[in-house]
Amino acid sequence: MSKYQSRDYSALRDYLAKYNDRIVVLSFDEIAGIIGDSLPNSAIDYNQWWGASARCTHAQRWEESGYKAINRGTNRQNKRMEFERQ
């Protein structure tokens, strides 16, 4: 199993589930701290990783919390992600 496949984003789901805010903004470092692992290079290098389809386990986890990752096109440069309540 690759390191990417072994990452568990359940902690991010649980973290986001505690919020009622319409938008939650987290830095990549904060997300890494929440999941207890570094983000994969693709999350840092490609904005598209965050908008992955619900078939991807990482996207399923935050969508289970009621949030969707919002790709503003500047997330990679700002090293942060916005999650919007659905």
Image: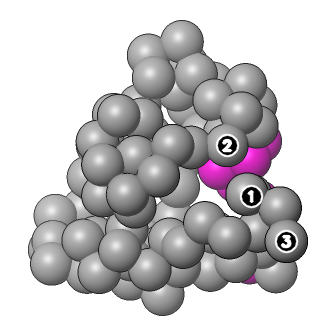
Relative to 66, is 48 above or below? Answer: above
Q: Residue at x 24, y 71 (%)?
A: 15
CA gap between label 2 and label 3 equals 14 Å
CA gap between label 3 and label 1 equals 8 Å
Question: In terms of secondary structure, where does tag 2 sit?
Answer: loop
Residue 45 image position (x, y, % from top left): 73, 25
Q: Residue at the top extreme?
A: 77
**Which residues lie in the magenta part?**
47-54
Residue 40 numbered mark, or none: 2
Q: Earlier in the sequence, mark 2 or mark 1?
A: 1
CA gap between label 2 and label 1 equals 6 Å
Asked whether the beta carbons under mark 2 and mark 1 sit within 8 Å of each other, the answer is yes
Q: Amino acid at mark 1?
A: Tyr
Q: Name which quarter of the figure residue 72 lies in.
A: top right
Asked whether the beta carbons under mark 3 and mark 1 sit within 8 Å of each other, the answer is no
Residue 83 image position (x, y, % from top left): 40, 55
Residue 37 in sight in this render? yes
Check if residue 37 falls in the magenta segment.
Answer: no
Relative to 79, is 33 above or below? Answer: below
Residue 66 in sight in this render? no
For mark 3, what is the residue?
A: 1
Q: Residue at x 54, y 12 (%)?
A: 77
Our reading of the magenta stretch's main secondary structure is helix
